[in-house]
Amino acid sequence: MAKFQKVYIEISDICGCECSFCPSVSVDKFGPMDLGLYSDILSQIRGKTRAICLHLLGDPLANLNLDKYLDLAFKNSFKVDLVTTGKYLNKHDFTTLCKAHQISFSLSAFIDKNGKFKDDYIDNLLDFCKFKKEIKSDIFVNFRVQKHMINEPKFKMIKDRFERFFGVKIDYNADKIRLDYKTFLVFKEYFEWRKPNSQNPHKYCHGLILQIGIKSSGSVVPCCIDARASINLGSLKEQSLTTIINSPKARAIIDGFKAAKAVENLCQKCEYKAVLD
């Protein structure tokens, strides 16, 4: 089986938010991934990926027993990335979280018109940054916000809080701003999850070549974008990952991308850039 730069493992498809830009509300939910299945997945990908990201659509911090998933990953020497809204940050041990390689907080979820967060949300984020600094952790911390949200009142509040806390001036002209040691504010381009009208079969993507996604149900998908498992390549409850990746359907996708051709309808309509994020 080929080596991946990143394997996305959705340890839960629950996030607790209903953001207007996210398809979560229309996706069938399976809940947390079974720990036994998760452990088996780690065994199958050991030595075959540089890093794992415990996210695909759901929020890994929505799992109150996240420590068990992280412990298994750390014991297997995986470099772990976390993507979260930060809504459940104060429900977890900061020491354990700081063992991860990277944690990215979606400020967009907080700023979104449907955002429902407690008043201490920003305080919790800054408390985590303070803790990270006190223990001299090497974890990367990214605060992500969609560029079109920078004029929203909530982001202006965040900007003021960040500037005071980190002692920096936030420049809107930069795509990435260093707030502190291994701590950044990142302005992201808006990504349209809904199916666009345009269709382009001529494109390259890292799906199944440098990255792969595994839903909490055990279904394998080509990439982190296929939240609905529209391109379901098989279930790890029934087949090995090697068997699934070497299936005719998976090979057609891989060979297609290598020839700059998207063979699946979803891939032809996808507007996400061919980057590893």
Image: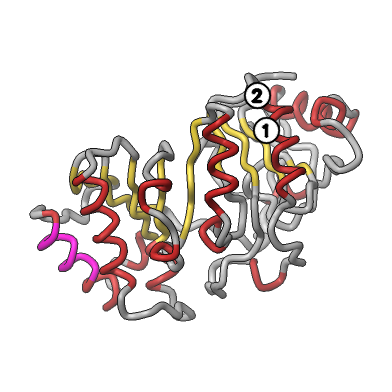
Residue 42, which numbered label?
Answer: 1
CB under 8 Å between callouts 2 and 1?
yes
**Local crowd size for mark 2, using a 10 Å CA cut-off: few (<14), some (14–19), many (≥20):** some
x and y percentages locating residue 58 in the rendered image = 60, 59
**Residue 38, how many percent across, how many down?**
70, 42
Disc marking residue 46: 2
**Secondary structure under badge 1?**
helix
Relative height, residue 111 to residue 237 (above, below): below
Where does residue 169 sit, x and y in percent of width and height? 10, 55
Question: Which residue range is magenta in the image?
Answer: 158-165
Q: Which numbered marker is on residue 254?
A: none
**Quarter assignment of residue 65:** bottom right
For the N terminus, the quadrant is top right
Give whichever of 107, 150 is nearer the camera. 107
Q: Quadrant of residue 113?
A: bottom left
- Please state if 250 lies on the left or on the right of 14 as rendered: right
User: Magenta: predominant secondary structure element?
Assistant: helix
